[in-house]
Structures are given as C-alpha cells and as structure tokens.
Amino acid sequence: MTTQAVHRVDVTVALIGIIGWTIVMISLSKTTDRRARWARFAMFSPFYEAYERLPATWGRTHALLFLTTAVWLVSMLVTASKLRTTLSVVAGASLAFLAVASALSA
C-alpha cells in the first residue's frame, strides 16, 4: 500500500469517527440525565486527534480548532437541548473540515 492510500484510509476513518461522535453527541444532548453532561465532556478525543493532525505552525486551522473547542464547551453549559444539538453539529462539521484540510495539506 502506498503512503497516499494509507493517508486516504486514515482520513476516511477520521471522518467516520467524527460522524459517529456527532451522532453520539446529538443523542446525549437530548437526555435530561445530569450524568449525560459528564459523558459528553469525556468525549474529547476528536479534538486531540484534530490537534495532532494539524501542521506544527500555528495559523487559521489552529484558530478554528480553538473556536470549535469553545463551541463544544459552550454546548456543555447550555440547558436548551435544541441549541446543544445545533452546537454539536457545528462542532462536528468543523472537525470534519479540519480533517479534510489536514488531508489536503499533506
């Protein structure tokens, strides 16, 4: 397998993981149980993976990752489930954009 094929598989798996993460965040945002907040908070790995994929130089992509993390943290504090769902979708779309941007830059 060439390095480009491995990279494509890596990006595809990342996008599938982000889609799954977004679905879980949406389903957890509709629950009223207080423990769901801790479960949502524990799902930080896509942000760490996005940080690891970005180039070493700080630029617009790092600013977008910071903004995405802030949106995700705000979704932890919001009480309206519809707004939490919207914020989760925005965070997931932003993570997907970052995954594609890192794929195109490599």
Image (tube, rainbow, N blue to C red):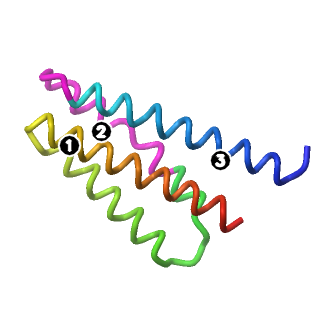
Q: Nearer the viewer, mark 1 or mark 3?
A: 3
**What span is colored magenta in the figure?**
30-48
- Residue 52 screen position, x and y as percent: 58, 57
Quarter of the figure with the N terminus: top right
What is the number of callouts on the image?
Answer: 3
Q: Residue at x 61, y 69 (%)?
A: 55
Kind of residue at badge 1: Met
Q: If you read the primary sequence from the N terminus, does the residue marked by circle 2 or circle 3 appear first?
A: 3
Query: Is 24 colored magenta in this rendering?
Result: no
Whichever of callouts 1 and 2 sits on the residue coming sooner in the sequence is: 2
Quarter of the figure that contains the C terminus: bottom right
CB atoms of marks 1 and 2 within 8 Å: yes
Regarding mark 2 in the picture, which secondary structure is present there?
helix
Q: Pointer 2: what residue?
A: 41
Residue 30 x/y as whole percent: 19, 26
Crowding around mark 1 (Cα neighbors within 10 Å: few <14, some 14 to 19, many 20+) is some
Residue 44 percent coordinates (x, y): 40, 43
Residue at the spot 30% in from the left edge and 38% down from the top edge: 41
Residue 76, numbered circle: 1
Q: Amino acid at mark 3?
A: Val
Residue under label 3, please give it. Answer: 11
| Distance in Å between CA atoms under marks 1 and 2 | 7 Å
